[in-house]
Amino acid sequence: MSTTVMSDAVMMPVTESQTVTANLTTEVEFAECDCCGLMEECTPAYMERIRERYKGKWICGLCREAVKEEIMRSGRLISTDEAMTRYMMFRRASRSSGPSPNPAVHLITAMRHIVTPCVFECQSQSQSPSQL
């Protein structure tokens, strides 16, 4: 994991005649998603919160949204663990059909998996009952 330190000077008014300059240092690390391999920049505190939610796994924002969608799409209440397992199985199945050398294709495939059911639901809801 690589680390980048970012520093910003912030002016904070104390009184009308005084100002205090605080030097804020934020450590940024790159983390690789355990699901899709996408790299994200984040702070260690943020990484810790995500890993707590997902049983020690680092899951990128896109995969987290896919896991949420899997929970909502299920006909019954399922746990985050079960939704993550289902999504990871989907990812493995889509990769076994022939991985693309371009990571953007993986990203597009994941987005298609999220959006496709929504598109069909919207189309069926827009039709009048006589068209069904």
Image (cartoon, rainbow, N blue to C red):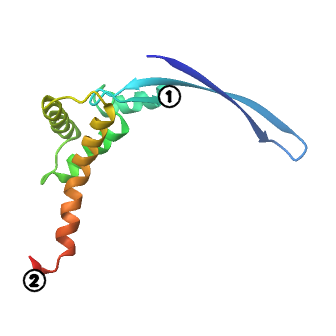
Comparing 57 with 6, the one in front is: 6
The N terminus, quarter of image: top left
Query: What residue appears at the point 76 percent right and 40 percent down from the top-left corner?
Result: 12
Residue 77's disc is none
How far is disc 2 from disc 1 in space, using C-alphas?
Answer: 54 Å
Among the two numbered marks 2 and 1 on one chain, the one whose residue lies closer to the N terminus: 1
Q: Nearer the viewer, mark 2 or mark 1?
A: 2
Label 2, residues with CA under 10 Å away: few <14, some 14-19, many ≥20? few
Q: Quadrant of residue 93?
A: top left
Q: Residue tagged by mark 2?
A: 130
Q: Secondary structure at mark 2?
A: helix
Q: Residue at x 78, y 32 (%)?
A: 21
At x 21%, y 36%, the residue is 84
Percent x, y for residue 95? 18, 31
Q: Quadrant of the C terminus?
A: bottom left
Nearer-the-camera pick, 116 or 29? 116
Q: Is residue 16 left or right of residue 84?
A: right
The structure residue drawn at horizontal position 37% and vertical position 39%, both measured from the top left corner, is: 61
Mark 1, secondary structure of its residue: loop
Task: Compare residues 78 and 7 and report the one nearer the observer.
Answer: 7
Whole-percent x, y for residue 127 in the image: 17, 76
Q: Which mark is on residue 43?
A: 1
Residue type, mark 2 in image: Ser
* Residue 10: image location, x then y, percent: 73, 36
Compared across the picture, whether 124 is left or right of 15 comes to left
